[in-house]
Image (cartoon, grey):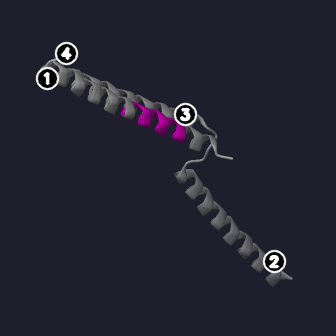
Amino acid sequence: MKSPAELVKKVALLQIGFISLVSEKVEKFIEELEEKGKVSEEEGKKFLKQLKEQMEKQKEEIAKEIEKVLRELPVATKEEVDTLKKEIQELKREIEELKKTLKEKS
């Protein structure tokens, strides 16, 4: 079973992929309208520029939401895991020293 963090990432990637796909389709549609003379090239470029700006904003918002959700999940960060590994190694060393000391006293 996938972790909540993996699921959140997959959903976000799907959203970003969907946004990109929609953007591509709209671009093709605008090109077709330009070819048919329904919109001017200038209007098409202006609309596509606005669309791309909106898409970028949405991608940024999705990324921010992902970060927020991941921070709220009960999942350790890489730094936290690394810190715990170091602490475990230190405790193992201390245990071995205590064992050695106990053997010497026996």
Q: Which residue is mark 3?
A: 69
Residue 9 is labelled as: none
Say if 60 sits above or below 3 in the image.
above
Q: CA distance from mark 3 to mark 2?
A: 48 Å
Residue 41 is labelled as: 1
Q: Which residue is mark 4?
A: 38
Amino acid beneath label 3 = Val
Foreground tag (3 vs 1): 1
Q: Earlier in the sequence, mark 3 or mark 1?
A: 1
Q: CA distance from mark 3 to mark 1?
A: 42 Å
Quadrant in the rendering for residue 31: top left
Amino acid beneath label 2 = Leu
Q: Which residues are magenta?
A: 9-20
Q: Which residue is mark 2?
A: 102
Say if 99 sits above or below 18 in the image.
below
Left or right of residue 96, residue 64 in this image: left
Foreground tag (4 vs 3): 4
Which residue lies at the image location 58% right of the left edge and 34% below the top edge? 72
Q: Earlier in the sequence, mark 4 or mark 3?
A: 4
